[in-house]
Image (tube, rainbow, N blue to C red):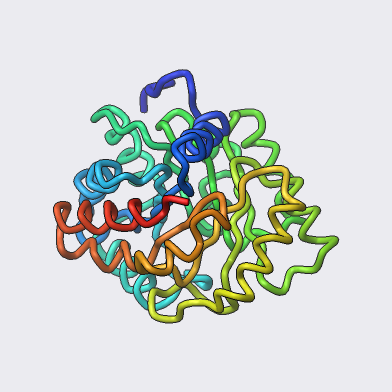
Amino acid sequence: MKEDITAAKQGVRAVADAFRRAGAEGRTAFITYLTMGYPARDAALELVPALEAGGADIIELGVPFSDPVADGPAIQRASYQALQAGMTPALCLEQVAQLRQAGIQAPLLLMGYYNPIYHYGPQEYVRDCRRAGADGLIVPDLPLEEADGLVEACRREALAMVFLVAPTTGMDRLQEIAQRSTGFLYLVSRLGTTGADAGFDAGELRRRLELVRRLSPVPVAVGFGVSTAEQARALAGLADGVIVGSAVVERAMQGPAALREFAAGLRAALRK
């Protein structure tokens, strides 16, 4: 894997710039999630450019895992199929490098569970993420108390380390997590797993967003249950970023053109 294949502006700086650009354009940042290796092993090489062309400011790339406890049926199925196709963390990194070599400019965050990172070697994984051209990590099952090693590795490589907060996270812990998160803070919109069908309570989420944004020193992006332009529009101006995952994974089966069109509709809905 080649060293430093991306431009100098990588990692935390690239993520921060994406939020700044969106704000300067009068809109909420649009963040998408895509499971790597789905619906075919090399599908990301066509689907990620489609998401960028459709207006995604930041793209989360899911590293498939056999026990994705935070994910709903759509992403579970995608992860299983990707694993069956032979997708591995190392292959995910190779594809990130290929995407950068193909000219992808959007920040790329690898979202995956800690078990594969542990077996890869946390220090080595973060190093190889930077070398491939990734900008940061999201590890949904890694508690703050056990994250010091990965946080420090990301700090040394200048990569973002994004933490999640739940609707039930107490005030003191919320502040602690927000202080440790770099790039942005991921606000889970509701209890349960990811999924396009579950939706969220807009009124309760609005109150939670106001609180979290007051406490967080980094931008706050909301995810879980956002799947339509109407839902995205309801959050425009309330959150710094909106994350769409399961609905994107479901559209991936329809190919790059359909995915680009879907992304463009969501992006247009996020004007404040």
Q: Quadrant of residue 177?
A: bottom right
Residue plotted at (51% across, 39% down):
23
Q: Is residue 271 above or below residue 124?
A: below
Q: Is residue 84 above or below residue 241?
A: below
**Drawn side of residue 16 relative to residue 182, left or right:** left
Q: Which of 248 and 129 is in front in this view?
A: 248
Residue 99 in sight here = yes
**Drawn side of residue 158 relative to residue 233, left or right:** right
User: Residue 239: x and y, percent?
Assistant: 57, 55
Q: Nearer the viewer, residue 213 or 145?
A: 213
Q: In this view, does 163 lie above or below 159?
A: below
Residue plotted at (31% across, 64% down):
249
Residue 129 in sight here = no
Q: Point out the residue furthest to the top here.
A: 8
Residue plotted at (47% across, 51% down):
272
Quadrant of the frame with the N terminus:
top left
Q: Quadrant of residue 154?
A: top right
**Drawn side of residue 45 relative to residue 8, left or right:** left
User: Residue 59: x and y, percent?
Assistant: 40, 47
> What number of labels is visible?
0
Q: Nearer the viewer, residue 162 or 241?
A: 241
Q: In which quarter of the image is residue 253?
A: bottom left
Residue plotted at (41% across, 31% down):
133
Q: In this view, does 253 lie above or below 73?
A: above
User: Residue 201: x and y, percent?
Assistant: 56, 78
